[in-house]
């Protein structure tokens, strides 16, 4: 079962797609796929309604695919969380997760344009496994029960402007929070349908050339360790998004001249079981 939101920006409506590809309207069950829906057992209720044949069949037609969750309360990101990515950028393997925030309003649909900021020369790509919280996580005692707090998993592109991030002083956030810098989706897959989040392949292409090809096995800190760690410093609430880091193959890690994104480039990315995205790069 896939949870998704279709419609123009700001007017998306909730739907569910069954394993056979049939699309069903969720409007009778919830107004949106948001924190309230997830906290109230919405995933289980959607599964039950689907199994009982209570949802109307609909056609997607030409409806735009939006981000599969409504704007999250926060987007928390983990840096340098793949061993080979740390190596390619010349960074040490972190002893604790590197944590930074991304503005929630940069989350857009999986096929929406990526916008190069004005004065940018170093806009980069990052395929990532996104984790969506389904139950409040606060000072979790053990890593063992952490995944019970995860509603599902999603494909995420943590677009970054490296000069803004690394060379302009201050924190990383301003290189991460530019407009449209987090395409998300196409759907949210319930956590119960991922047997092991540490065994997923991730891939990304630019203009048909594959740049990233790795697996979540290369993570320094697992999904469970990340959620447990973050819960010691902040309250994770239903609907919050965690971007868990990117593998090797980003533009930053390439020899000069680095192949940063330019107007007209096409970025495609995928994660096993979580679908595929396709963005055209435009100048803001």
Image: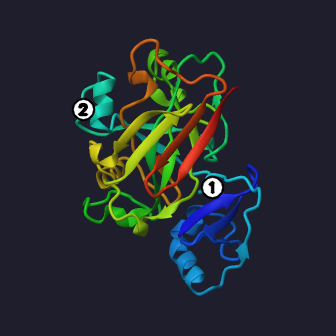
> Is 227 on the left-hand or right-hand side of 18?
left
Residue indicated by mark 2? 93
- Relative to 54, does residue 248 appear above or below in the rendering? above
The mark that comes first in sequence, 2 or 1, is 1
- Relative to 70, does residue 158 appear above or below in the rendering? above
Disc assigned to residue 70: 1
| Label 1 residue SS | loop
- Relative to 80, does residue 254 appear above or below in the rendering? above
Point out residue 104 in the picture as x, y percentages from the top left corner. 58, 44
Point out residue 253 in the picture as x, y percentages from the top left corner. 38, 23
Residue drawn at x 63%, y 85% as measured from the top left: 53
Q: Say which quadrant the C terminus sits in.
A: top right
What is the quadrant of residue 174 in the picture?
A: top right
Q: Is residue 209 visible?
A: yes
> Is 75 on the left-hand or right-hand side of 93?
right
| Label 2 residue SS | loop
- CA gap, disc 2 and disc 1: 34 Å
> Is 222 on the left-hand or right-hand side of 69?
left
Q: Nearer the viewer, residue 138 or 93?
A: 93
Point out residue 3 in the picture as x, y percentages from the top left corner. 58, 64
Q: Nearer the viewer, residue 279 or 143?
A: 279
Residue drawn at x 61%, y 33% as measured from the top left: 266
């Amino acid at each position: 079962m896939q949870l998704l939101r279709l419609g123009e920006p700001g007017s998306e409506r909730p739907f569910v797609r069954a394993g056979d590809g049939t699309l069903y309207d969720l409007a009778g069950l919830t107004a949106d796929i948001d924190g309230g829906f997830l906290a109230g057992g919405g995933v289980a209720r959607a599964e039950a309604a689907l199994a009982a044949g209570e949802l109307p069949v609909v056609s997607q037609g030409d409806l735009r695919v939006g981000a599969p969750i409504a704007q999250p309360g926060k987007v928390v990101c983990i840096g340098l969380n793949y061993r080979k990515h740390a190596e390619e950028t010349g960074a040490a393997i972190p002893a604790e997760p590197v944590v930074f925030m991304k503005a929630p309003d940069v989350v857009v649909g999986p096929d929406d344009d990526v916008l190069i900021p004005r004065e940018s020369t170093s806009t980069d790509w990052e395929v990532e496994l996104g984790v969506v919280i389904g139950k409040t996580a606060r000072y979790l005692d053990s890593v063992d029960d952490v995944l019970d707090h995860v509603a599902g998993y999603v494909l995420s592109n943590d677009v970054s402007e490296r000069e803004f991030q690394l060379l302009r002083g201050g924190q990383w956030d301003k290189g991460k929070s530019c407009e449209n810098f987090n395409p998300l989706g196409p759907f949210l897959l319930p956590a119960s349908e991922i047997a092991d989040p540490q065994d997923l392949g991730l891939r990304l292409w630019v203009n048909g050339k594959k740049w990233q090809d790795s697996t979540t096995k290369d993570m320094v800190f697992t999904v469970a360790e990340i959620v447990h760690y973050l819960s010691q410093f902040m309250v994770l609430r239903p609907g919050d998004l965690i971007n868990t880091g990117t593998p090797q193959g980003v533009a930053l890690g390439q020899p000069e001249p680095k192949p940063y994104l330019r107007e007209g480039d096409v970025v495609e990315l995928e994660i096993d079981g979580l679908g595929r995205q396709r963005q055209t790069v435009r100048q803001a």
